[in-house]
Image (spheres, rainbow, N blue to C red):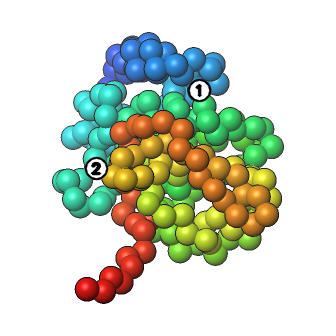
């Protein structure tokens, strides 16, 4: 869901997006034109509360509420750039976008694919899928990929997400092959963690 539009000079925000591309994306190896074009076209400040709009182009995540509240986030620009690059969205793709609470990721994807269905992290964590999506993208880092969300992928469907491994967040991707999805870590990135995808707690005995 898009936040209420922030009142700002369009020329200033366009300049901020150009600076974001030059200083945060290109310098980190994100140079593909479809990625840069989408991140130039979508104003990040439109997906933040007015009080946080000035933080739209910083190089780290902006949390929507106080720390620990779990009210959502807008991740750092580099995360979205790397995610789009790894996802390689195609015009025929049916996409499930698991929101970090702002709708920004879905907005980036919509012109690139056939259809985008957006869902909250809480709803995605309890999803009962039936192979209807070619691509699943998750706006945040997960500890655990629920079977229902994995099952939402079509055979050979792709998933790109953040992943928590040994308390470090990494960009990761995988495919659904023979009913299974194996996520492979690509690189370390600062990514907000989605509490809805915490790993199931296991009993331990003294």
Would residue 101 be seen by someone viewing this image from the given angle?
no
Query: How many numbered callouts?
Result: 2
Quadrant position of residue 77: top left
Q: Is residue 17 above or below residue 198?
A: above
Along the viewing direction, whichever of 107 and 189 lies nearer the viewer:
189
- The residue most toward the left is 66
Mark whose residue sits in front, 2 or 1:
1
Task: Please name the residue shown 61% across and 66% down the image.
Answer: 149
Q: Which residue is drawn at 29% across and 41% down?
A: 62
Mark 1, other Cα within 10 Å: few <14 / some 14–19 / many ≥20: many
Q: In this view, does 38 lie to the left or right of 90?
A: left
Q: What element carries label 1?
A: helix
Q: Distance between the residues labelled 2 and 1?
A: 24 Å
Estimate the x, y position of residue 198 in percent, counting from the top left. 40, 66
- List x then y, in percent, for residue 114: 75, 45
Which residue has dot 2 on it? 64
């Amino acid at each position: 869901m898009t936040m209420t539009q922030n009142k700002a000079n369009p020329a200033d925000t366009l300049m901020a997006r150009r600076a974001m591309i030059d200083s945060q994306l290109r310098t980190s190896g994100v140079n593909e034109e479809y990625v840069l074009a989408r991140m130039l076209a979508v104003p990040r400040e439109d997906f933040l509360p007015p009080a946080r709009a000035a933080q739209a182009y910083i190089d780290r995540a902006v949390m929507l509420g106080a720390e620990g509240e779990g009210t959502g986030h807008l991740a750092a620009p580099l995360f979205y750039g790397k995610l789009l690059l790894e996802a390689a969205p195609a015009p025929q793709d049916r996409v499930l976008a698991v929101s970090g609470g702002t709708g920004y990721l879905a907005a980036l994807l919509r012109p690139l694919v056939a259809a985008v269905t957006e869902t909250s992290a809480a709803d995605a964590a309890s999803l009962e899928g039936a192979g209807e999506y070619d691509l699943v993208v998750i706006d945040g880092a997960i500890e655990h990929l629920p079977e229902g969300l994995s099952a939402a992928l079509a055979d050979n469907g792709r998933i790109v997400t953040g992943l928590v491994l040994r308390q470090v967040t990494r960009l990761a991707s995988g495919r659904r092959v023979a009913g299974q999805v194996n996520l492979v870590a690509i690189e370390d990135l600062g990514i907000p963690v989605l509490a809805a995808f915490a790993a199931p707690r296991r009993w331990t005995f003294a």
